[in-house]
Image: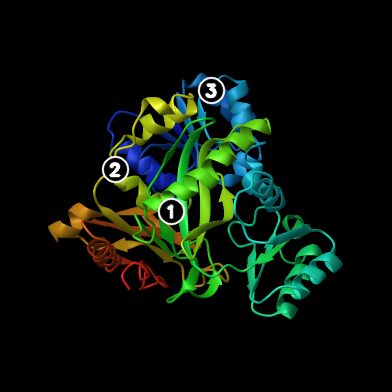
Amino acid sequence: MKILILGSGGREYSMGLSIYNENEHELFFMPGNGATSRLGKNINIPDYNELSLWAKENNIELTIVGPEGPLVDGVVDIFKENDLVIFGPSRAAAKLEGSKVYMKNMLKKFNVPTAAFIETSIEKDAYTFIDNMDIPIVVKADGLCAGKGVIIAQSKNEAKAAVKDMLDGNSFGDAGRSVVVEEFLDGYELSIFVICDGENYKVLPAAQDHKRIGNGDTGPNTGGMGAYAPTPLVNDEIYKKVEDRVIIPTLEGMKNEGAPFEGVLFIGVMVVKGEPIILEYNVRFGDPECEILMPLLKTPLSKLLYKASTKDLNSIEIELKDEFAVGVVMASANYPYSSSSSAEIIIDNIVDEDIKNNTHISYAGVIEEDGKLFTSGGRILVCVGIGASINEARNRAYALCGQVHFIGKKIRTDIAYQALK
């Protein structure tokens, strides 16, 4: 097949790498990054109408949308209007991520367990809710903020200040003109990804990511500093509760809303005393979770996503390797505070067969110049290790980290620590 992948990050690179390794397809990326050009061809057609015409003229048989932006902007609707097969939710269904207010109201409507909350654009109402809450308190901007629109306030005054900054447009611009204030849930967090075709679904192994910049989950939130899967912190009982209480009512509810959900439903779960409580929905693969889920798939990714995109998901079974994957994000010096100077990425000649055969790099914020890769952005790449245990996969991932060099490289050294306690 000719396959087009939209996006430029590690998530899109890892999906591309998985399909590239099938050795059957011709790959295109829009816009891609400096390393995706080694898997296929990068193109630059940012207008979705023009892109859909290009896809039709070039006989693209499957388009995969990586990031949330194009989904919220309606790229799926445009492609479908041109009779193209595309993996992802419609604009209407993508509101589950595009608006936290909409998402929380849908959770309430579908009777999905979630934290107590208020959604409002009125400062006084938010303050009244905060005054009746225990601390910490969670404040979220309504719109898309690249994973950074969430404040966990340690005092009521801090929560009120966060609300004021968002509603005034100081923190996140128009994305914060409406806010969600909710109770803080004390438990452990999981990422569960569900492949959907509007009616049917397949659940992938639960992953856990590490959002904060520092070891021990300290410092500000980031887009994610590492992840691992499957996590032993989930069991069959929790999977069953998530299916019965979350996935099934959400898919039925979205269908009744006239916005059947197709694509990846990313469920952010907080497990509190054995009970799954839903933090949020996203409408695409997580990053860096995607980087560690892809190498665990035995089922060809292209086949799985094509079946989901053509409402034929029930005709395929997901086969998984009996292994674990750990991904360690390598970030630039000033991430997540500010941009950093570009630096050449140098990778040692890896002679250890164990590392060579059981690790790989998923590239994200990189550009290519004269055949060399340079850093360009915050999260630069992900070092992925595979193993028969989490510890083995983790050790391999960190061994690979030691082979990758650029000025100012930054990593966490405790990825998967909760599973290894």
Residue for point 41% across, 27% down:
314
Q: Secondary structure at mark 1?
A: helix
Three-letter code, disc 2: Leu
Label 2, residues with CA under 10 Å away: few <14, some 14-19, many ≥20: some
Residue picked out by circle 1:
238
Three-letter code, disc 1: Ile
Q: Is residue 397 left or right of residue 117?
A: left
Up the image or down, 146 lies above or below 220; here it is above
* Residue 125 or residue 356, whichever sits in front: 125
Is tag 1's residue or tag 2's residue first in the polypeptide sequence? 1
Label 3 and label 2: CA atoms lie apart by: 29 Å
Label 1 and label 2: CA atoms lie apart by: 19 Å
Residue 24 in the image: state x and y as whole percent.
Answer: 30, 28
Residue picked out by circle 3:
84
Residue 23 seen from this side? yes
Residue 232 in the image: state x and y as whole percent.
Answer: 34, 60
